[in-house]
């Protein structure tokens, strides 16, 4: 029975979540599997991978073939390196302690790279937030200046209106002349 280490899709549409499983090559993608080795969540940055490295090495030693994506994940987590080191121990090229020492050194280096990436992402995120905040502060200052100018213009317009009203009240009222010839004749006849 040929065994493959592959991904089994779970999650919802647009938000995939995968199980890393050892399954018969003839079974369906999301069908029956022999052993669940780990999980893979590509929705986060960096991707979250939980893997039973010893279980994966055991399946690799027994002849399981990983798919391309599964092989990349196993390499990323160090299962392929550990499989290589176990092969070296079985052949007598190195001792178990040397293999464990090499693997642990690789794990420490890999964790440092992952932490550096996380720090870089968080720094980039913080920088982006700082730029957005700076832009908002600038826009708010411009709005405050514009509001102050509008308020000053409104005060000036109100003062001009009051001055015009005061000037209108201070002007003498002109005497109204007769509006028509008939009114003028009536006024003349009354005086006589």
Image: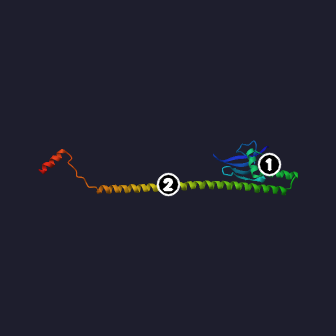
Image quarter (top left, top right, bottom left or bottom right) of the N terminus: top right
171 vs 134, nearest the viewer = 171
Dot label at residue 143: 2
Q: Of discs 2 and 1, which sits in the foreground? A: 2
The reply, left or right, for residue 50 in relation to residue 152 is right
Q: Give the total of numbered labels.
A: 2
Dot label at residue 60: 1
Q: Quadrant of residue 137?
A: bottom right
Q: Distance between the residues labelled 2 and 1?
A: 65 Å
- The residue that appears at 46% across and 55% down in the rendered structure is 147
**Residue 164's spot in the image, x, y percent?**
34, 55
Could you say whether the residue bearing mark 2 is in a helix, strand or loop? helix
Name the outermost residue toward the top: 26
Q: How crowded is mark 1: few (under 14 residues within 10 Å), some or many (20 or more)?
A: many
- The residue that appears at 68% across and 56% down in the rendered structure is 119
**Residue 14's spot in the image, x, y percent?**
63, 46
């Amino acid at each position: 029975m040929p065994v493959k280490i592959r991904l089994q899709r779970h999650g919802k549409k647009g938000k995939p979540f995968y199980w890393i499983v050892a399954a018969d090559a003839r079974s369906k993608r999301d069908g029956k599997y022999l052993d669940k080795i780990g999980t893979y969540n590509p929705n986060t940055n960096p991707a979250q991978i939980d893997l039973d490295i010893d279980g994966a090495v055991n399946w690799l030693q027994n002849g399981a073939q990983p798919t391309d994506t599964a092989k990349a994940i196993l390499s990323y987590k160090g299962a392929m390196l550990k499989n290589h080191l176990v092969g070296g121990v079985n052949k007598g090229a190195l001792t178990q302690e040397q293999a464990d020492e090499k693997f642990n050194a690789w794990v420490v280096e890999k964790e440092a790279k992952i932490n550096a990436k996380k720090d870089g992402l968080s720094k980039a995120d913080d920088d982006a937030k700082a730029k957005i905040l700076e832009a908002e502060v600038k826009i708010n200052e411009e709005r405050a200046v514009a509001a102050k100018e509008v308020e000053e213009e409104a005060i000036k317009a109100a003062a001009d209106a009051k001055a015009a009203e005061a000037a209108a009240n201070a002007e003498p009222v002109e005497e109204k002349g007769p509006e028509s010839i008939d009114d003028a004749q009536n006024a003349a006849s009354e005086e006589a």
